Amino acid sequence: MTMTTDAPATRPGSARERLLGAATELFYNEGIHSVGVDRIIEEAGVTRATMYKQFAGKEGLVLAYLEGEDRGLRGLFAQAAQASDDPAVLLDLVVEGIERDIRDRHTRGCPFINAAAEYPDQGPVRDLIADHREWFRETLRQLAEGARLRDPDGVAASLVLLRDAALVGGYLDGQDRVGPAFARTARDLIAAHRA
């Protein structure tokens, strides 16, 4: 006889992973507040008690979803760093990665911007979003500084703004139109700031 348990292990297929996978798909595609806990539980195939044991509530699940998005982006930066340690090359890889992300993965906008729209007040969700954006901006600033670009703070702020606009624009106007426009504009910005 085979027994199935909702153990808290994080192996693929565990209750935690199924809950997080279901929440990630539903939150991103349909919106956080429009998806109820019961729907996530049903999609994940777990009990209500298991959900609350794993995440202590919907907000805990929202935070885990956004933490996963943050880890994913940080992982892409880590992969790029393995390809080269030249900041100029890394900036180009970042531009390529964002263009690919707009086209292939985040086709419904930025998960952080989407979440911020649903959580307008300060709290744990907005704190996580602010931490993610600060890390992203600072990482870009360090790359711009390492590539000896003029005004690395301005370059980083502009690249964050361009990415935000491209993710929203990709959703509204189509990834095939916006992705290349983002890449062209980002590369022009970088070239204009070369010392």
Image: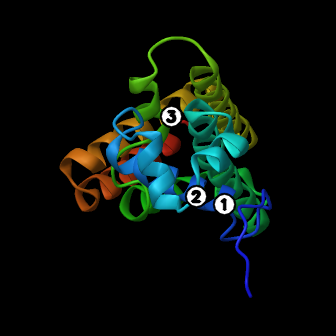
Q: On the image, numbered disc 3 is attached to which residue?
A: 160
* Residue 178 falls left or right of residue 2: left
Q: Looking at the picture, which amino acid does disc 2 mark? A: Val
Query: Which residue occupies 73% across, 36% down?
Result: 142
Residue 51 x %, y %: 62, 46
Q: Nearer the viewer, residue 5 or 34?
A: 5
Sequence-earlier tag: 2 or 1: 1
Q: On the image, numbered disc 2 is attached to which residue?
A: 46
Total marks in image: 3
Query: Which residue occupies 33% across, 58% down?
Result: 180
Residue 187 x %, y %: 46, 49
Sequence-earlier tag: 3 or 1: 1
* Residue 176 falls left or right of residue 25: left
Label 3 to label 1: alpha-carbon separation: 35 Å
Q: On the image, numbered disc 1 is attached to which residue?
A: 15
Residue 34 x %, y %: 33, 36
Residue 26 visible in image: yes
Q: Secondary structure at mark 3?
A: helix
Placement of the C terminus among the 4 image quadrants: top right
Above or below, 145 relative to 90 = above
Residue 138 x %, y %: 69, 31
Sequence-earlier tag: 2 or 3: 2
